[in-house]
Structure formats: structure tokens, C-alpha cells
Image (cartoon, rainbow, N blue to C red):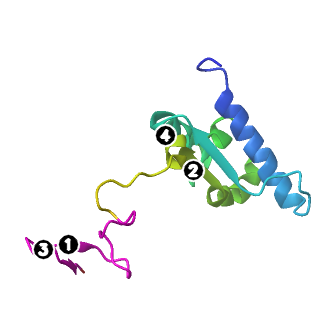
Amino acid sequence: MATGTGKTVVMAALIAYHFYNRQEYSSDIRFADNFLVIAPGVTIRERLSVLRVDVRDGTEAEDYYAQRSLIPRSWRPRLHALNSKLVITNYHAFEPKTLQGNKRSPYDGKAGPDGKKSKRLGKTGRSRLVG
């Protein structure tokens, strides 16, 4: 569909519909618990950020739920929980990761088991943890 036809507004309306109905009818499996939006690229992913709930209330909120008046104002406080149930990513996140060279893990020695970064020292080839 062309730009400006309302695709994102429809997505926001569907997300709000499922979100509120799941809260009201928690045992009904017709309504989704979590939402995954997969964008075709980084630019589109950034544009879809209007699907996240802006914590500011009133006219300064920059999400489509407030801008497009998709929900009544009295329902707005309950909508803040949506951000923890919504993931917006691009399809690149699902592509297999390829390791090059002699890398044995995706961490490639950049983090130790305790999560601290390690730094390579000179010609010895040894690493030390940097705190």
C-alpha cells in the first residue's frame, strides 16, 4: 500500500483492541498477550516507534493512540503497560549470524563470564578484564 494510507494506524488500532480485550478477558485465547512487529528495514522500524506508548499524557504525547484518538482518555493510564509487551524489530535480527576467522563464540572474548569487558594486551595475545 502507498504511503499515507493508514497502515500504521490500523496496526495501532489492532494492538489496542487486543491489549484491552486481553486485560478484560484474560482467559480468552482469541486475544494476544504480546506483540511482535517486524519491519523491512531500520528506517521503517524507527517510523513504527509511534506504536510505543509515550508516557507523556495529553496533547504532547507522540504515539498514535493519543494523536489519532484511538482510545478514550480514561483508558490511557492502563495503556502504559503495553510497552513491555511490544517488540519492534527489523527482519535483520532473524538472519543467522556468521562468525569469521577463529572466533569460537558470538562474544569473541569481548566479555568475560561475569559480563565485564575484556581488553586485549599487546603481543602476548592474553586478555585481561577491564572493570
Q: CA distance from mark 1 to mark 3?
A: 6 Å
Of marks 4 and 2, which one's residue comes earlier in the chain?
A: 4
Going by the numbered disc 4, the residue's amino acid type is Glu
Going by the numbered disc 2, the residue's amino acid type is Asp
Q: Nearer the viewer, mark 1 or mark 4?
A: 1
Query: Considering the numbered disc 1 on the image, is that residue within a helix, a strand or a loop?
Result: strand
Going by the numbered disc 3, the residue's amino acid type is Leu
Label 2 with label 3: CB-CB less than 8 Å: no
| Residue 128 lies within the magenta run | yes
Residue shown at the point (63%, 37%) measured from the top left: 67
> From the viewer's perspective, is 4 left or right of 121?
right
Query: Considering the numbered disc 4 on the image, is that residue within a helix, a strand or a loop?
Result: helix
The span picked out in magenta is: 104-130
Disc 2 residue crowd, few under 14, some 14–19, many 20+, Cα 10 Å:
some
Q: Quadrant of residue 117 in the image?
A: bottom left
Task: Please provide percent x and percent y for residue 53.
Answer: 61, 50
Name the residue that disc number 3 marks. 121
Residue 46: give its label.
4
In the displayed structure, 45 sits above or below 74; it is above
Task: Please provide percent x and percent y for residue 25.
Answer: 90, 59
In the displayed structure, 85 sits above or below 67; it is below
Q: CA distance from mark 1 to mark 4?
A: 33 Å
